[in-house]
Amino acid sequence: MSVHTVSGKGLRAGMVDQLIADHAAKGLTMRPEVEAALRTVPRELFTPGVAVEEAYRSDTAVITKRRGDETVSSVSAPWLIAEMLGQAADALGGLQGRHVLEIGSGGYNASLLRELVGPSGSVRTVDIDPDVTARAVACLAAAGYDDVTVVCADAEQPIGPVRRYDLIIVTAGAWDIAPAWTAQLAEDGVLVAPLRTFGMTRSWALRRVGDRLVSHSQRLCGFVAMQGAGAHEMRYVDIADGVHLRLDEGQRVDPESVGGLLTRRREQAWAGVSLPPRTVLADLDLWLAARLANEAGRFVVLSAQQDAVDAGVVAPAWRFGTPAVLREGTFTYRSALRWTEDMFDLGACAHGPDAPAEAGRLVGHMRAWVDSGQPSPVLHVLPAGTPDGDLPAGTVLDKRHSRVVLTFTPA
């Protein structure tokens, strides 16, 4: 289907080899059809003006449009594209012959999908930005994928002509699930979407069951934010130089009070566990979010610049987003790991009058996750207005269009 470029062929092979190795390091196996698509599509044709070596970096997105300092469009990093395509193919048992709607265009992902669905399938890609869709049309034609339908529209509304899709895959960060997405899914169809819950984004593969969606898998991810009617602003509060709280779901905190707590003595507690490197700590973070959100405290997400971490202002587990809680005047968060040879322990840091107790409380939740078999999160998405009695038992988040319920099942 594609037009091959000689200059990128060797780099493309190296990129895919690296992606396969990265999958293996995470305990994942790349599906052969996804590997074949990645080896076929010339990514450099979708990143004009960028050095071919940059186009084929496995861990890096290529920014294609900015608005001031904000990135509003990009060609996603190959590792993330590969994982999301794998999620979709796993949930549907393969994509051959499937009809797909992609929300958030750029062309590269749509071309990979075109390879995966084969001659009997179809791909439609939509974006709200006419610059992005014009660019996608040109790039798809240059790569030989002019049978992909490109639409300029706000995908918060149904995309005409309305039809049912086996797969809808979203490549922009969403805060909620638009009713149009569920309505356009075939029964038993799959929606793969990077959905923000508790201020943390995961790519969820969600299967339609009647008027609700239930997750099949989830992966840690990050995307440029959704635009249009589905946009939802993430709020950041500075609590120290280079240290921030990421607030979502109506959260409110006094930044000065939290910042003052960071000047107090830091208390460290450890869970006393030994875990291997492949442990999925993204699952633990959602477990902590659900537990902390149900307690008498304010759950937040801590983020920090590298300079603040190096200076010892904070010691978060992951500086781009670590679960934290403000409870009874004490600020507590999951800390950096403690390694012993090839195993690690989980810890918590706390600042405030009840720091030792609060650090101990947080590591208690971590031990409970380990003792429960490191359960995996399951997301249920139901329409707004669904009665409480019809919800599964779990932690409930009410959004504009939906009621989201987070539950856990043993891994």
Image: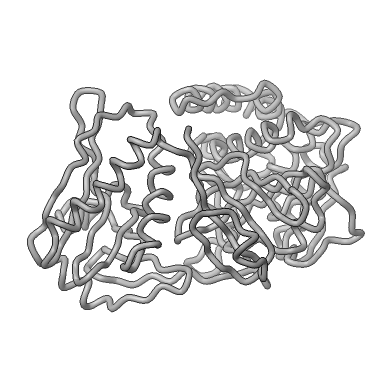
Judge by depth and name the residue closer to the eye, 225 or 341. Answer: 341
| Quarter-of-image position of residue 91 | top right
Give me the residue at 16% from left, 69% from top. Answer: 261
State the residue in front, 316 or 349.
349
Please state the horizontal and vertical placement of residue 236, each as a whole percent of the image: 38, 70
The residue positioned 7% from the left and 61% from the top of the image is 265
How has the structure been colored for display?
A: one colour
Instruction: Report x, y in % for residue 264.
Output: 9, 65
Quarter of the picture containing the N terminus is top right
Position of residue 240 in the picture relative to residue 244 (left or right): left
Q: Is residue 141 left or right of residue 28?
A: right
Find residue 306 and report its horizontal and vertical position in percent.
26, 53
Judged from this view, the residue extending furthest toward the left is 265
Name the one closer to the observer, 359 or 265. Answer: 359
The quarter of the picture where residue 290 lies is: bottom left
Q: Residue at x 73, y 66 (%)?
A: 156
Q: Residue placed farthest to the front in the image?
A: 389
Residue 102 at x, y = what percent? 74, 50
Q: How many marks?
A: 0
Left of 176 or right of it: where is 287?
left
Give whichever of 63, 381 is nearer the camera: 381
Which residue is drawn at the image coordinates 83% and 61% (left, top)?
159
> Can you say whether 312 is above or below 275 in the image?
below
Q: Is residue 263 left or right of residue 88?
A: left
User: Please, is residue 100 above or below residue 403 in the view?
Assistant: above
